[in-house]
Image (cartoon, helix red, strand yellow):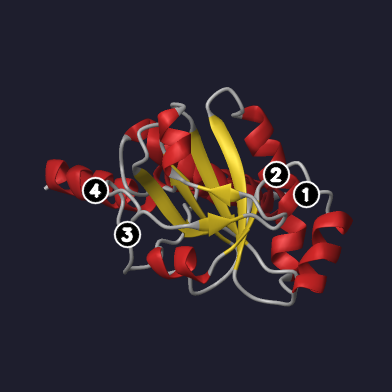
Amino acid sequence: MDALIVSNVMLWILLVALALVVFALTRQIGVLHERLAPAGALTLSGGVKAGETLPSMSLSTFDGRDLQLESFAKQKRGVLLFFLSPTCPLCKALLPVVMRVAKEERAWLDLVFVSDGGTRAEHEAYVVDRQLERFPYVLSQELGVALQVGKLPYAALIDEAGVLVAKGLVNSREHLESLLEAKRLGVASINEYMSAKMRDEAEVNV
């Protein structure tokens, strides 16, 4: 009988200890969740920087029309430049997301697709296959060089005044929306904003 009582007491002690451990882990997970923010688009150094305007350049759309980026600012419209390639599978997967975001922000934002590689036949088939006919589709190496686009998919957000707000690699809707969030917060990138915020919190806690 004494052994049974001792074993029951030990089991209760272990159960309480386990509950405390679970509680502590749950609390820690909650703290980490509060501190970790969604990753923003990865911004690469070089090229036109946030807060600057793009140099004037002569651009032509896939169907032969002239396109001046300055024209969007004259109409008080922002523009999202999405850099892609017909041979980029991630670009293709992200296209519905890009067009959905553009539709949600259509009150102030226009969408322009940009590419600098591949043959005309490849682009022609791509435009038809992905139903991109209603958007300007620009073939330009100059624009990619100006923004130092090295990897795809890549996006750049220009505000209604013609100023580059943010740019970077975008592999998900989260990355894409981080450009819009950067505009709302008035920062060059969400990553930069979170780094500054964490530094400030560290200084306060010292």
> In the drawing, does residue 109 fall left or right of residue 90?
left
Q: Is residue 67 above or below residue 160?
A: below
Circle 1 or circle 4, nearest the eye: 1
**Quick one: SS at disc 1?**
loop
Among numbered discs 3 and 2, the one appearing first in the sequence: 3
> Residue 106, percent across and down?
61, 28
Instruction: Compute the Cα span from label 3 to label 2.
Output: 24 Å
Question: Which residue position holds label 3?
Answer: 48
Instruction: Compute the Cα span from label 1 to label 4.
Output: 39 Å
**Quick one: SS at disc 2?**
loop
Question: Which residue position holds label 2?
Answer: 135
Q: Nearer the viewer, residue 96 or 118?
A: 118
Amino acid at pointer 2: Phe
- Please name the residue shown 86% across and 65% down the image: 125
Instruction: Compute the Cα span from label 3 to label 1.
Output: 27 Å
Question: Which residue position holds label 1?
Answer: 132
Q: Nearer the viewer, residue 26 or 36?
A: 36
**Quick one: SS at disc 3?**
loop
Among numbered discs 2 and 4, the one appearing first in the sequence: 2
> In the drawing, does residue 37 fall left or right of residue 80?
left
Q: Are marks 1 and 2 in contact (CB under 8 Å)?
A: yes
> Residue 10, percent across and down?
61, 52
Can you see residue 31?
A: yes
Question: Which residue position holds label 4?
Answer: 196
Number of other residues with Cα within 10 Å of mark 1, as a class: few under 14, some 14 to 19, many 20 or more? some
Instruction: Compute the Cα span from label 4 to label 3.
Output: 22 Å
Circle 4 or circle 3, nearest the eye: 3
